[in-house]
């Protein structure tokens, strides 16, 4: 028999501690530091062209990160997102390059397919009663196979201009279309997560599934819904990416993006156990990582040092967040 | 660890001198506890308990839920550290034990929830942590032989190479006992060993106990099945509310005498008086079965507080989940206000007007890392939303409303639930259940781990709820609370209903007798 009662001092309301403010702003601070450092190191870095370039290059990653953030908040994890995107990208580009279907049909197909794949992940997680990280490790392999079956290892290009406009075009000649679409999606997801009852239930299901179940929430349904919705976002991201690149293939159109998304999520303080996470921080983290790779490219450090830098930043952020947690 | 040469050691010397003089005591003391006290923030778990265990005896510890049995064995096993008192073993006195020390001194505990390496073999589990070979390599052949021999003695015929997870509960228990024997344990503590095994297996267990006894091993036996104590025990010690009551020889007592020793506390706390309930039946079960329960029949009247008594493992919480829809019903019927209902999920129960205040506040009730208003509105968030958009103003207003009504002590409702005391957290959980406007409330251990002041407030709140026409099912392990608050009490024993007591039949002994299945 253990009777313990919590008698922590009642926290002072209203006043935020320095540590709390710091951890709230750590992503913008990181972004600003990176911007300053690369502006000093490279004279080409802080130019409008390059900055817009960074925005455009990472728009699809930001859309993906929205989906990953929702999944992580609901207490899941999706490793299959990269190949989910790959399946969708090669399908849509194959259909378009062969001129089989019109652009709107191709887009709808791509998005619907990703939703089915996402729902499959969610349903499998529920039926197998396993952590979705393991389930999606398996489905990742399945999606990889499907993607290569569709593409037969070919690269597809030669899509119509109206499709390429989604990734390369500009509204009024200034605002990049893909960045605009990304911003609209970020706003929608932010509203869903922050302002709606559905968002509230997603947080509850991730924070404490048993308490959520006993509070009358259908936790399984919520999780399947989240995976399906994330599939929708991944489908959109696949279109944005293939339209910007002008081509797609199974190996590079998507795979790896799940790790960028999860990295951004962890950097932004999305709890791996679920129930916690703020979308704008995740998006800022995506762009901080984007600035890092762009900047390193400009100062002549290639892809491999970038991997090392990303890993080091992640370790540093884990150290910082642990210190914060302990000082609370 | 404090090592004092006290009278304990001196007495051991005296004993050996006496032995030498040929006046050997009939029952030398193996283990002695002196004036052990252990307090937790809200409760005194052990209050000046002194007990001695003799060599080669089977000594039972009995008491109600919360009497201090578990705390006592944890003290002996070194899992917790008492505030004061001494533990004497081998003529040495210790202020407390560590788990390693207690093992080294020959104390082994066979816990009810066995902690074993499920994916490893029987022999590896038995020899876990033992140095039984000289070099760096494990001598599997020797282990195999020794294990087989040992299990043969216990009439247990599993292969030493079988994996633990393939074994039945009874065999796993025997493995735990074998582990103790391999370590040359002098004291073996068994915590509810018969709770999850069959009658046949129980007979074998008793044989093993006899075998250990014949080898002068002291056995401390904890069980709530009083009848079995008369089969195997030599002496019984009774604890009540953390106090040592007495030790009796088993042949000088009977079940009813034991029950009267286990209860018989003074009702000290004051309970608010409750106006009598109505006569309308709001909830009725007939032959309700499932989730470990069988054939449960009761009626709940409007405005009534119906108590549920039983010992740990009797199935009270499981019954509540069955009624709420969070567990699967296999048979029987439930009527809600005269209509038969079939709940498959908690959402069904909630929608039909049942609210649950779960047993485990921290893991089932609260979202600790979320704000208070968030906690309160999670069950009725849909009614606070328009086209799925949460009306934050209405949500905050609801939170403030409950803060006032329930007297939740928190500066603001935007604070996180984990910053509140247990009593205030409980009020938040009650507010959450209330927010979906239930007619029937299930309070599972409403005041566990809550200080006296907040407890009175929660009692008052329950009375107010019944005055508003709500009906309450209350599970409690606190006998006083049950007798003080309930209008009738349903008593369960191992998944069966053993009786329903009316208010004028209430007595601690009656409840305890039924809860012990007598």
Image (cartoon, rainbow, N blue to C red):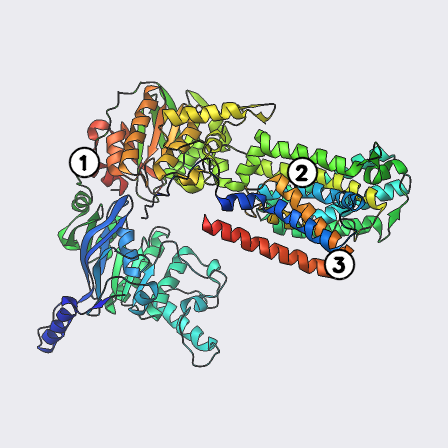
Q: Report x, y in % for residue B405.
A: 37, 24
**Quadrant of residue B191 in the image?**
bottom left
Q: Nearer the viewer, residue B64 or A290?
A: A290
Mark 2 or mark 3, whichever is nearer to me: 3
Q: Nearer the viewer, residue B439 or B162?
A: B439
**Quadrant of residue A231 in the image?**
top right
Q: Report x, y in % for residue A185.
A: 70, 35
Q: Report x, y in % for residue B248.
A: 15, 53
Q: Quadrant of the C terminus of chain B?
A: top left
User: Do the dots labelled 1 and 2 sit on one chain?
Assistant: no
Secondary structure state at the residue bearing disc 2: helix
Secondary structure state at the residue bearing disc 1: loop
Please, which chain is the residue tagged with disc 3 on? Answer: A
- Contact check, label 1 and label 2, Cβ < 8 Å: no
Q: Nearer the viewer, residue B409 or B245?
A: B409
In the image, is A206 to the left or to the right of A290? left
| Residue A68 - label | none
Is the residue marked by circle 2 packed among few (<14), some (14-19), or many (20+) residues within 10 Å? many
| Residue B268 - label | 1
Residue that mark 3 sits on: A303
Rounded to the nearest angstrom, the CA distance separating label 2 from label 3 is 33 Å
Rounded to the nearest angstrom, the CA distance separating label 1 from label 2 is 58 Å
Q: Quadrant of the N terminus of chain B?
A: bottom left
Residue that mark 2 sits on: A228
The answer to whether any part of residue B469 appears in the image is: yes
In the image, is B46 to the left or to the right of A228? left
């Amino acid at each position: 028999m253990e009777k313990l009662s919590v008698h922590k001092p009642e926290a002072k309301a209203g006043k935020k501690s320095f540590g709390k403010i710091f951890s709230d702003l750590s992503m913008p601070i990181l972004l600003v530091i990176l911007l300053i450092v690369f502006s000093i190191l490279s004279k080409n870095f802080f130019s409008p062209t390059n900055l817009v370039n960074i925005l455009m290059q990472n728009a699809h990653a930001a859309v993906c990160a929205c989906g990953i953030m929702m999944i992580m908040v609901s207490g899941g994890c999706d490793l299959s997102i990269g190949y989910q995107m790959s399946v969708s990208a090669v399908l849509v580009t194959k259909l378009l390059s062969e001129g089989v279907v019109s652009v709107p049909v191709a887009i709808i197909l791509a998005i619907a397919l990703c939703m089915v794949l996402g729902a499959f992940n969610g349903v499998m997680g529920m039926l197998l009663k396993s952590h979705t990280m393991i389930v999606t490790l398996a489905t990742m392999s399945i999606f990889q196979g499907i993607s290569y079956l569709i593409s037969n290892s070919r690269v597809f290009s030669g899509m119509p201009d109206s499709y390429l406009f989604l990734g390369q075009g500009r509204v009024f000649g200034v605002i990049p279309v893909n960045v605009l679409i990304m911003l609209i999606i970020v706003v929608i997801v932010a509203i869903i997560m922050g302002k709606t009852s559905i968002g509230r239930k997603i947080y509850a299901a991730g924070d404490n599934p048993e308490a959520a179940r006993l509070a009358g929430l259908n936790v399984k349904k919520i999780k399947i819904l989240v995976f399906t919705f994330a599939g929708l976002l991944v489908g959109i991201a696949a279109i944005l990416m293939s339209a910007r690149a002008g081509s797609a293939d199974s190996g590079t159109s998507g795979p790896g993006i799940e790790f960028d998304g999860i990295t951004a999520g962890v950097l932004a303080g999305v709890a791996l156990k679920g129930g916690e996470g703020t979308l704008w921080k995740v998006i800022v983290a995506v762009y901080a990582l984007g600035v890092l790779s762009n900047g390193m490219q400009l100062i002549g450090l290639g892809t491999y040092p970038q991997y090392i830098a990303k890993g080091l930043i992640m370790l540093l952020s884990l150290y910082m967040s642990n210190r914060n947690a302990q000082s609370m | 660890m404090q090592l004092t040469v006290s009278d304990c050691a001196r007495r051991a010397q005296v004993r050996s001198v006496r032995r030498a003089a040929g006046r050997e005591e009939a029952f030398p003391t193996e283990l002695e506890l002196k004036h052990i006290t252990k307090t937790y923030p809200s409760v005194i778990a052990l209050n000046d308990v002194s007990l001695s265990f003799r060599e080669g005896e089977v000594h039972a510890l009995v008491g109600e839920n919360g009497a201090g049995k578990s705390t006592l064995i944890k003290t002996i096993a070194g899992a917790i550290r008492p505030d004061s008192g001494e533990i004497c073993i081998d003529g040495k006195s210790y202020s407390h034990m560590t788990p390693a020390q207690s093992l080294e001194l020959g104390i082994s505990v066979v816990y009810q929830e066995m902690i074993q390496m499920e994916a490893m073999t029987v022999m590896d589990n038995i020899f876990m942590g033992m140095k039984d070979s000289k070099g760096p390599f494990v001598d599997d052949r020797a282990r195999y032989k020794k294990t087989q021999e040992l299990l043969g003695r216990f009439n247990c015929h599993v292969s030493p190479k079988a994996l633990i997870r393939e074994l039945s509960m009874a065999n796993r228990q025997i493995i735990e006992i074998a582990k103790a024997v391999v370590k040359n344990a002098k004291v073996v503590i068994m915590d509810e060993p018969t709770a999850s095994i069959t009658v046949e297996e129980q007979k074998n267990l008793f044989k093993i106990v006899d075998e250990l006894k014949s080898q002068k091993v002291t056995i401390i036996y904890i069980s709530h099945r009083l009848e079995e104590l008369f089969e195997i025990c030599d002496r019984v010690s009774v604890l009540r509310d953390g106090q040592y009551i007495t030790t009796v020889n088993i042949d000088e007592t009977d079940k009813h005498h034991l029950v009267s020793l286990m209860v018989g506390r003074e009702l000290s706390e004051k309970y608010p008086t409750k106006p009598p309930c109505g006569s309308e039946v709001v909830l009725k079960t007939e032959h309700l079965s499932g989730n470990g329960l069988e054939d449960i029949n009761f009626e709940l009247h409007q405005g009534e507080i119906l108590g549920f008594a039983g010992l740990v493992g009797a199935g009270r919480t499981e019954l509540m989940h069955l009624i709420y829809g969070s567990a699967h019903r296999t048979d029987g019927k439930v009527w809600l206000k005269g209509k038969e209902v079939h709940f498959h999920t908690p959402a069904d129960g909630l929608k039909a007007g049942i609210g649950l205040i779960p047993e485990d506040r921290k893991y089932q009730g609260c979202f600790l890392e979320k704000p208070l208003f968030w906690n309160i509105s999670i069950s009725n968030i849909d009614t606070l939303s328009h086209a799925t958009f949460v009306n934050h103003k209405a949500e905050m207003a609801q939170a403030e409303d409950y803060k006032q009504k329930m007297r939740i002590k928190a500066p603001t409702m935007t604070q996180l639930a984990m910053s509140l005391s247990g009593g205030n957290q409980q009020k938040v959980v009650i507010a959450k259940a209330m927010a979906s406007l239930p007619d029937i409330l299930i309070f599972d251990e409403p005041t566990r781990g809550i200080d006296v002041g907040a407890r009175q407030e929660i009692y008052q709140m329950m009375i107010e709820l019944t005055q508003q026409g709500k009906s309450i099912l209350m599970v409690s392990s606190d006998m006083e609370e049950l007798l003080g608050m309930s209008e009738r009490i349903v008593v369960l024993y191992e998944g069966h209903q053993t009786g329903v007591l009316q208010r004028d039949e209430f007595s601690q002994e009656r409840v305890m007798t039924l809860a012990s299945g007598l």
